[in-house]
Image (cartoon, rainbow, N blue to C red):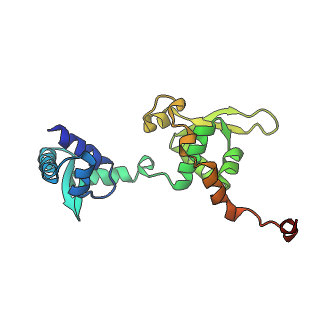
Amino acid sequence: MTELARILEAILFVADEPISTGELAQVVDEPSDTVTEALEELADALADGHGLVLKQAGNGWRLYTHEDALAYLERYASTDRAKRLSNAAMETLAVVAYKQPVSRGQVSEIRGVDSDHALKTLERRELIHEVARAPGPGQAVLYGTTMLFLEKMGITAVSDLPPLADHVPPATIMETLEMPMRPESSSNDSTN
């Protein structure tokens, strides 16, 4: 298989909808005819006893599972591990990953909503676990991420997570976003 076909396979593997030949050509910086040839090469290679097939769907190309695997895929889809995490669980996981060790109350405070259900889901999926108990009254459970979390993220340590600063908008944008949520100043403030 050519390098271009392998690159296209990787792109199609992570895509959640069909991608047009033109868009693929732009991404790989190759002429559309060359991309079409590589896609046909990939389709032929996958047709030879693989669990995936490449098909044209709508206005683009997409990888699909081979129809012979359907019964096994249905069985796998019914397991807890196969179910996707909700947005709430993803937000909760991000808080735990960046703030660990962190208590249930701290997670809920950061998110602004009760996070008990999301934390239980993450524990059941073995993405987080109890790492310690907080000192003081109540000795709240403190959560941290697991080795499975690191594996799923493709990293070897929590320190390999991208810095949060890379994902936080500049202060001017934050101020603009927060403006509608701030209480209006009283009429007395405007007369001074």
| Residue at the (52%, 39%) spot, across then down | 126
Quick one: which residue is furthest to the bottom in this view?
187
Horizontal and vertical percent for residue 80? 45, 49
Q: Is residue 32 left or right of residue 109?
A: left
Q: Quadrant of the C terminus?
A: bottom right
- Of 124 and 23, the residue lying toward us: 23
Horizontal and vertical percent for residue 68? 20, 52
Q: Is residue 93 left or right of residue 178?
A: left
| Residue at the (78%, 32%) spot, across then down | 135
| Residue at the (45%, 32%) spot, across then down | 155
Q: Quadrant of residue 176?
A: bottom right
- Can the viewer see residue 65? no
Horizontal and vertical percent for residue 189? 85, 65
Q: Is residue 62 left or right of residue 117?
A: left
Q: Quadrant of the N terminus?
A: top left
**Rendered position, 132 above or below 38:** above
- Can the viewer see residue 35? yes
Horizontal and vertical percent for residue 152? 44, 38
